[in-house]
Image (cartoon, grey):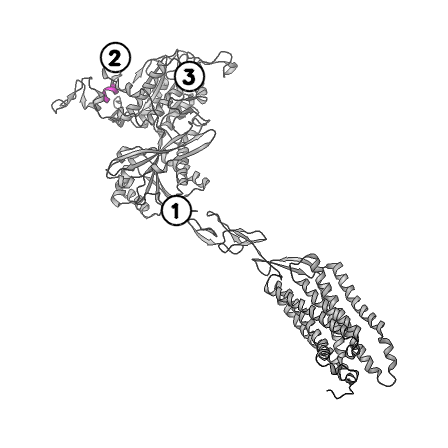
Amino acid sequence: MHKAGDAILGGLFQIHFFSVFPDLSFTSEPQQPTCHGFDVLGFKRAQTMAFAIDEINKSHNLLPNVTLGYSLYDHCNILEIGFRAALSLSNGQEEQVKLNETCVGIPPVLGIVGDSSSTRCLAISSVLGLYRVPMVSYFATCSCLSDRQKFPSFFRTIPSDAFQVRAVIQILKHFSWTWAGLLISDDDYGLYAARSFQSDLAQSGGGCLAYLEVLPWNKDTAELRRIVEIMKKSTARVVIVFAHDGHMIDLMEEVVRQNVTGLQWIASEAWTSATVLQTLDLMPYLGGTLGIAIRRGEIPGLRDFLLQLRPELRLNTNNGNNLVNQFWEYTFQCRFAPPPPGWLEAGGALCTGQEDLENVDTEFLDISNLRSEYNVYKAVYALAYALDDLLQCESGRGPFSEHSCGSLQRLEPWQLVYYLDKVNFTTSFGDQVSFDENGDVLPVYDIMNWMWLPDGITQVQSVGEVKKSPLKGEELTLDEDKIFWNFESKKPPRSVCSESCPPGTRMARKKGEPVCCFDCIPCSEGKISNDTDSTECTSCPDDFWSSPQRDHCVPKKTEFLSYHEPLGICLTATSLLGTFICAVVLGIFIYHHNTPIVRANNSELSFQLLMSLKLCFLCSLLFIGRPTLWTCQLRHAAFGISFVLCMSCILVKTMVVLAVFQASKPGAGAGLKWFGVLQQRGTVLVLTSLQAAICTAWLVSSSPTPHRNTQYHNDKIIYECVVGSTVGFSLLLGYIGFLALLSFLLAFLVRKLPDNFNEAKHITFSMLIFSAVWVAFVPAYISSPGKYADAVEVFAILASSFGLLVALFGPKCYIILMRPERNTKKAIMGRGTTK
C-alpha cells in the first residue's frame, strides 16, 4: 500500500497469517513467496497508520507545509519476508538507482513504523541501526530491544516486557501471592520475559516460582501432558503465562482433558485479548483471568475513515488495490472479476465494490477496544512531531555541528533519531508520549479481567491500570469490587508455599527448596519476632525480656527484698518488735535500777548491751528495700559495729564476772582494780573501734555497691549489694566471731561458780545460740539467690539478736516482774531458801 508525499513513512504489518515459499531448485529464477490467511486486525492496523497520516496532512499545526506519504508492506508473519520488506523500504528499491548519483535528497523513508514481533525487530533493527534509520515498533515488547548499544535507532510505543514483568509482580504483591508457576513461549519474547521475571522477583523479594516450563511450538502432546501434570500436582494456585494465543490453545486442550480447575491465570499482553480462548468450553478454566493489556485508547474519526474504504478508490494507484481487494473479498466472501475457475459454478458471488461495510459484522469496524491500533497511531505521530521539530530549527541555533539544522532536502536519518529522543507530546486521549534513554515509551498497561456471566456470555473488562510517571514512579491501581473470581468463595485465592509465621516465631528455610518454603521455629527465651518475614529472632534489650508469646519485649521484673511483700513485711515487723522489746526491757531496768538484780549484774553494761541490741534490730531494716549506694555501704558497717558493740559488752561482762569470783579467793583481790567502770568503758570502746577501723578501711578501699544481677534469672533483674572486697567482709564477720568465741570460752569457764544467780550460765547459753545461728548463716547465705540472701542475713541478725535478748535478759525480767521476792540481796547471795 503506497501513497505519495513530500516525505514517506514506511510500515510493516501482518496482513496475512501464513506464507508459502516456492521450491528453490536453483535451476530457474525463484518466484516470490505467496501469503494466505487474511488477518483483519493486521489490515486494521495498517489502515490506522494511513488514517494518522491523513489526519496529520489535514492539520495546520503539525507539519503545515509538508505532505506525508506512506509505503506499507505485509511481512506475512515470517522473518524472511519482513526483513526483505524493511530493506526495500530503507534502500528505495522501488526507484531506479544510479551509481554515480550523489547521496543527497530526501531518503526513501524517514522512518519505519513496525514491526509487531520482537524477533523480527531484533533482526531488522540490528541492520537499520547501522545507518541510524529510525524504527518505531507498536508491538515488540522484548526487554532485549532496550539495549541502546545494539539498537541505537529503535523506539517503541508499547512498554517493554521488563515493565510488564514488574506489573505482574505488583499484582502478585497486591494479592499476597508468593507462590506461582511460570509458563513461557520458546522464543525471545518468552525467554527474555522469564529471565527478567526471575531477576526482578528475586530483587523484590515478592515471592518464588514453583515451576518454570517452556511451552513447545509444535503441538507436542507428551510435553504438554507433562507440563499440565506439574501444574496439577503443584500447590501453587497462580499460573503466569508469557506466551502467544497459539501456545495457549494447545495448552488448554490438555488442561481440559485433565480437568485442572481452581487455578488463577495471569495473562501477558500477548493473549489477554485473545477471543479465540474466550469460549464456553474454556471459560470454566480461564474465567477470572487477570491480564496485562496494552493501553486502550480512542482515535476520533477512525471509524468514519474505515467506512470510506472502497476498492475502486485505489484502482489507479500502483498496486494499491491488492490488499484492499483481498480485504473486500475476505469480508464479503466474494471475488473480483475475473473470478477463480469454478468460483461461479460453485455458487460464489462477484464483488461489485459497492458493498456496504456497515451491514457486515466485522472486527475491522470495532473501535471500542483500540490497543495495538492506538500504539500505531502514537508511533506515526512520534515520527511526525520529530520531523516537525527538525524543520522548525532556526539556522545558527541548531543542535548539530556549528549549530546547523537539518533540512528535508538534505535529511540524514540520525538527525531524525536525535529529535525522536526528545519527542514529548500528548494525544487527544490524554496520554503523554515521550521516550527514555533506551527508546522506551512511558509505560502504561490496563489490567483486564475475564468475566464469565451467568448466561454464559464472556466479557473482558478493565479493572485497573499500572503505569509509570516521572514523579510518582510505578503505580498499580485496582478496582477489586469489579474483579470476577472464578472460585466458590468469590474471593482471591491463597497461593503460598508456606503460611506466614505467626508472631513469636522465625522462618527456617527448608533444605533444597525455594526461600518461600519454610518452617516456623519458636523464638528462644529473651528473643522476639513480630515480623512475619523474619528469619532471625531479635534479642530484647538488657532491661527487657520476651513476652510469653515471644512477640514483644516486656520490662524485666525487678526483685529485691521489699517492704511491700509478705517476707519483707514479716522481717520488718519482727525487727520493730525486737526494737520495741529492747526498749521495754530497757524501761524495766531503768525503773528497777535500784533493785539488787539490776545492780548485781553491772547495770551500765546491761544498758549498753540493750542499746547495742536495739541497734542490731534496727540495722536489719537497712537490708530491706531497693539497694542504693548509701544503704549498701551502711548496712554492713552498721551490722558489724552493732554486733561488735554487743559482743564487747558481753565479753567485758563475762570478764567482770570472772574477775569478781577470782577476787573472792584469798590474795586475789588486787585483780578487781583492772575492771573498774572506766576500764570497762575503755575496753568496749577499743574493741568497737577496731571494728569501726575495719569498716572504714573496707569502705575506702572497695566499698559495697548496688548491682543489677541478671545471672540468677534471665527474666528478672535482681537488685543486690555486692560486698566489694571479700577480705573486708570476711574480716568484719571474723572479728565478730572471734569476740563471740572468746566470750563463750570465758563464760564456759565460770559457768559453775557458786552463785544463786550466775550470769555466766546465761552468757554461755546465749553464745551457743549466737554461734549456732551464724554458723548456719554462712552456707545458707552463699546458696541463697537474690533477695533471699538478704532475707537470710536479716533472719540471722534477728535470730541472734532475739537469742541474746532472751537468754541474757529473759530470766532477769522474769524475776523482776514475776518473782520480786527473789529480787533481794539475800536471795541473790544464796543465803535464802529460795531455789
Looking at this view, is 492 or 760 the one in front? 760
Q: Are marks 3 and 2 in contact (CB under 8 Å)?
A: no
> Residue at label 3?
387
Which corner quadrant of the image does residue 558 belong to? bottom right
Estimate the x, y position of residue 385 in percent, counting from the top left.
Answer: 41, 18
* Residue at 39 percent of width and 46 percent of height: 496
Q: Which residue is mark 1?
A: 496
- Residues tagged 3 and 1 counted as in contact (Cβ below 8 A): no
Per the picture, the main secondary structure of the magenta-coloured stretch is: helix
Kindly report which numbered mark, 3 or 1, lies closer to the viewer in this rendering.
1
Amino acid identity at mark 2: Asn
- Indicate the secondary structure of the residue bearing disc 2: loop
Please check the rendered image and state whether residue 323 is part of the magenta-colored stretch, yes or no: yes
What percent of the width, then of the height, locates residue 487? 31, 44
Give percent across and percent down for residue 501: 44, 50
In front: 372, or 458?
458
- Most extreme residue toward the bottom is 833
Residue type at tag 1:
Val
Which mark is first along the chain, 1 or 2?
2
Rendered position, 556 above or below 317: below
Secondary structure, mark 1, is: loop
User: Which residue is the site of mark 2?
Assistant: 316
Tell me where the magenta segment starts and ends, as one range: 322-327
Q: Quadrant of the N terminus?
A: top left
C-alpha gap between disc 3 and disc 2: 30 Å
